[in-house]
Amino acid sequence: MMSTKELFDKLKKEWPEIQGDFVPELWKKTYKEKHEKTFFESVDLLQKMENMSTEEAEKKLLDILVKITFVETILTLQGRQKSAEIFENLQKYQNNEPSIPFCSPEDVESFCDSMKLVFRREISKKYRNTGVQSRRFIQEIKRRLELGDVINVNTIDDVIQEFRTTVFNKYGQKFAEMEIQLDFSSLRQLSVVVHGFKYNDEEERLYLDDNASDFLDLHLPIFTETIYFDHVLKKDLSRHVSGIFMLNKTGYPKRSQYFMNSEDMFQTEASLYRQNLNTDSPHTFSTMARHIMPNHPHDNAELFRIDQVPFSLINNFATGNAGSIIFDRKKNKCTMLNATKFLKRLEDASAEHRNT
């Protein structure tokens, strides 16, 4: 069995560091050769949708994929940006190519807004990448609605569970199964941030919009397999997740392992290197913000902000005094084990309440 160091040495050779340089011909070759099945399936679909020749469909799709790959890579390496910032960075990474496939920030904005499956525009007007599983899920929702399935607040949980059985990620399975929750919190939100859908508030049900067939990103599977979609060592600086984390263990060298307690990514892992640690300390809970590393073998995020949570904030839920937890009508010492039991009780109670 390989050691952790041996595994990462092997992965670094297999997965070279992601570069931002504009290399359109290399990208086109990669899509046609390393994504052959999905690429040519998408070419066939595009040919039928727009009534064009195979050559025309292939050229159009490659041009779109080059644009997506360029913008997606810049966002991965540079973080969330407005269209003007993206355009500026695209020019910096032009490499030796005579031109880039965008002529202005407005051109970048128009393209990103036409590919809402791949790019999410935040309230700040900054763009970020969406998750691979979120893209797959949206296309699956579209397929189900076309078949006449009813997708509403009563059926969506079953739809999600069925979808999770189709998810496979060699190193980040747990994260991949939960990834869609980072991009969508409700059916209503889905209908707002992704074109082609509409939500009926009275029925609490999702429908396809009349113009859903016009949006290529809802139909072509290659958009779920952009070049770096499965890069094991990818760290996407445009994607963040934050929440409450609980210390699990400390190993060598001074490496603290945390599990996320927030519902959206429950039990996903994060690591922190720190000098001093007391596992009986009240500060075994922290609020953390993390960059997403979706395919990583050990941690699916890299921490970039940490705030300690005083235990008394949690005790207030149980009207206990700082330094103790009240459950089973008894005052219990504030330890890692008792804190876990207490949170498990809260989690079970919340689940029971949601089901009533």
Image (cartoon, helix red, strand yellow):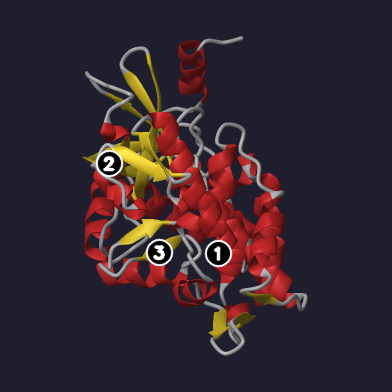
The numbered mark at residue 311 is 2
Q: Which amino acid, mark 3?
A: Arg
Q: Which amino acid, mark 2?
A: Phe
Packing grade of label 2 (10 A; few <14, some 14-19, many >=20) is many
Q: Is any atom of residue 111 visible in this view?
A: yes
Q: Which residue is mark 3?
A: 120
Packing grade of label 3 (10 A; few <14, some 14-19, many >=20) is many
The numbered mark at residue 110 is none
Nearest to the observer: residue 342 or residue 233: 342
Q: Earlier in the sequence, mark 3 or mark 2?
A: 3
Q: Is any atom of residue 236 visible in this view?
A: no
The x, y position of residue 34, in whole percent, is 62, 39
Q: Earlier in the sequence, mark 1 or mark 3?
A: 3
The answer to whether the residues at label 1 and label 3 have Cβ atoms under 8 Å apart is no
Q: Which amino acid, mark 1?
A: His
From mark 3 to mark 2, how far is it between C-alphas?
36 Å
- Horizontal side of residue 63 vs 209, given as left or right: left
The x, y position of residue 257, in whole percent, is 40, 27
Q: Dividing the image into 4 quarters, which one contains the C terminus? A: bottom right
From mark 1 to mark 2, how far is it between C-alphas?
25 Å
Residue drawn at x 53%, y 47% as measured from the top left: 28
